[in-house]
Image (spheres, rainbow, N blue to C red):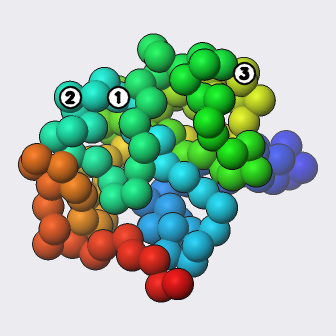
Amino acid sequence: MDLQIKHYENKLAFEMDPSDLFEALNNGEKIIAIDARKAFAFDAEHIPTAINIPHREMNEETIKHLDRSYVYVTYCDGIGCNASTKGALNMAKLGFKVKELIGGIEWWKFDGYATEGVKGSTTGAKVECAC
């Protein structure tokens, strides 16, 4: 039983689903979404407020401007892509608190949340600051 509990606690410590991310962003939590895909994919469509740092470009230089007090949530296309996993690993190796978004941008859209970019969909729920 203890092993099961630890497994699920670890899972929740390192993963987040779209509804949890949406809620955290709307509540002003110290959390930033990182699109770990290449720039052309980010430009086409991304989660509102997300920043783009392709996993292949993550290093001390490209992340030096980031605030280490935040939790960073990496994402990619979805379950058929592992850019979010590679990005999360890179960020953890660089000393950041990081989680991976389950299902990527595809599950974000599946859950009905808006996206931004050239192909963005503004018909879903938007992330907006209430400050």
SS label for mark 1: loop
Please name the residue that numbered disc 3 is placed on: 93
Q: Is 28 situated above or below 87?
A: below
Mark linked to residue 117 = none
Image spot of residue 66 (x, y percent): 63, 40
Is the residue marked by circle 3 packed among few (<14), some (14-19), or many (20+) residues within 10 Å? few
Mark linked to residue 40 = 2
SS label for mark 3: helix
Q: Nearer the viewer, residue 81 or 32?
A: 32
Image spot of residue 118 (x, y percent): 11, 47
Q: In the figure, is residue 73 to the left or right of 105?
A: right
Label 1 or label 3, whichever comes before in sequence order? 1
Q: Residue at x 52, y 84 (%)?
A: 131
Measure the alpha-carbon separation of dots 1 and 3: 18 Å
Q: Residue furthest left?
A: 119
Q: In the figure, is residue 34 to the left or right of 30?
A: left
Please name the residue that numbered disc 1 is placed on: 37
Q: Is 27 situated above or below 31?
A: below
Asked whether disc 1 touches disc 3, contact meaning CB atoms under 8 Å apart, the reply is: no
Q: Quadrant of residue 18 in the image?
A: bottom left
Closer to viewer: mark 3 or mark 2: 2
**Label 1 is placed on what type of residue?**
Arg
Image spot of residue 48 (x, y percent): 34, 59
Q: In the figure, is residue 58 to the left or right of 51?
A: right
Closer to viewer: mark 2 or mark 1: 2
